[in-house]
């Protein structure tokens, strides 16, 4: 499939590559790669950024709307190009790199005994993950997921007591489009990347999802429940909106 160029949007050309991506050209000659995806849960055409791959994603609710998703991206190519150019640099999970852990700097080191990851105090703190350098990232992620689930479980338990609700389970995932979710049957899921944010930000996201156990919407009642658990939720939400791309850009 070949899509026509549209000079009204600054697109010089569009080309469909292997049925999954389109390449656009924005003002200034910048080439923009847009991945096309189908997500049955999407209610409309959506453009989102994949910080780790440094590309945009055009999401369509059905496969029949893939062409529309590509055109939708073409109409917004200059905005997409600008956002991609301002993405933070990727932080790799490898020896010698400094990453964020609970909002503070943490240096990754392969020094240490055994094969258990350990955190040592200091400025910066040191995360020791001894072992094969080729598996450093996997071991760092495993440590972060474990700590994230522990912190989130504590926060969720506390907020559920405040709201007098119960949950059925907690899981941590590597989600890209949302920081947390809540199902009708009480299953809560969170991005493990919240462990890199300041603790108050993680606590806000936990409060947000616990409030959904009472209100599966974002009504005034819902936000009142969030405020009961996290009085300064607006400040924490603002931090996440400002720095969330940095958390998503960490690791491959």
Image (tube, rainbow, N blue to C red):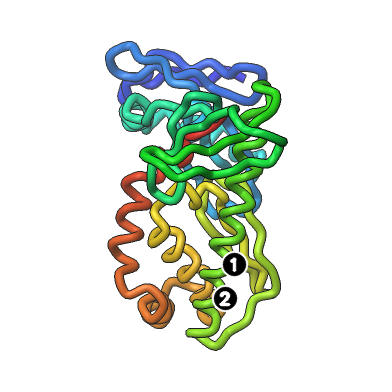
Viewed as shown, does residue 67 lie left or right of 12?
A: right
Most extreme residue toward the top, as rendered?
A: 29
Residue 49 location in percent, x, y?
Answer: 46, 36
In this view, 251 is above or below 222: above
Q: Quadrant of the C terminus?
A: top right
Q: Nearer the viewer, residue 36 or 187?
A: 187
- Residue 22: mark: none
Q: Quadrant of residue 186?
A: bottom right
In this view, 4 is above or below 67: above
Q: Nearer the viewer, residue 192 or 199?
A: 199
Q: Nearer the viewer, residue 74 or 179?
A: 179
Q: Secondary structure at mark 2?
A: helix
Viewed as shown, does residue 169 lie left or right of 5?
A: right
Q: Residue at x 69, y 28 (%)?
A: 131
Residue 233 location in percent, x, y?
Answer: 34, 67
Alpha carbon of mark 2 to alpha carbon of mark 1: how far? 6 Å
In this view, 138 is above or below 177: above
Residue 35 seen in render: yes
Q: Residue at x 60, y 61 (%)?
A: 150
Residue 48 seen in render: no
Residue 12 location in percent, x, y?
Answer: 38, 14
Q: Quadrant of residue 123?
A: top left
Q: Secondary structure at mark 1?
A: helix
Circle 2/circle 1 CB separation < 8 Å:
yes
- Residue 153: mark: 1
> Disc 2 designates what residue?
157
How crowded is the residue under tag 1: few (<14 C-alpha within 10 Å), some, or many (20+)?
some
Q: Quadrant of residue 37?
A: top right
Q: Residue at x 62, y 49 (%)?
A: 145
């Amino acid at each position: 499939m070949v899509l026509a160029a549209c000079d009204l949007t600054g697109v010089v050309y569009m080309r469909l590559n292997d049925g999954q991506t389109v390449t656009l050209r924005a003002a200034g000659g910048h080439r923009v790669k847009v991945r096309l995806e189908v997500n049955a849960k999407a209610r409309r055409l959506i453009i989102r950024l994949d910080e780790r791959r440094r590309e945009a994603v055009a999401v369509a609710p059905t496969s029949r709307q893939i062409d529309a998703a590509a055109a939708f991206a073409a109409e917004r190519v200059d905005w997409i190009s600008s956002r991609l150019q301002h993405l933070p640099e990727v932080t790799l999970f490898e020896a010698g790199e400094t990453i964020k852990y609970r909002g503070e700097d943490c240096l990754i080191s392969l020094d240490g005994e055994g094969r258990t990851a350990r955190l040592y105090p200091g400025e910066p703190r040191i995360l020791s993950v001894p072992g094969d350098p080729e598996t450093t990232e996997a071991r760092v992620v495993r440590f972060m997921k474990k700590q994230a689930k522990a912190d989130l479980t504590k926060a969720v338990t506390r907020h559920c007591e405040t709201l007098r609700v119960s949950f059925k389970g907690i899981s941590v995932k590597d989600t890209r489009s949302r920081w947390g979710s809540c199902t009708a049957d009480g299953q809560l899921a969170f991005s493990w990347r919240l462990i890199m944010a300041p603790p108050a930000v993680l606590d806000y996201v936990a409060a947000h999802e616990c409030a959904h156990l009472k209100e599966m919407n974002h009504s005034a009642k819902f936000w009142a429940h969030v405020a009961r658990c996290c009085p300064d939720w607006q400040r924490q939400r603002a931090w996440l909106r400002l720095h969330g791309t940095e958390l998503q850009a960490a690791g491959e």
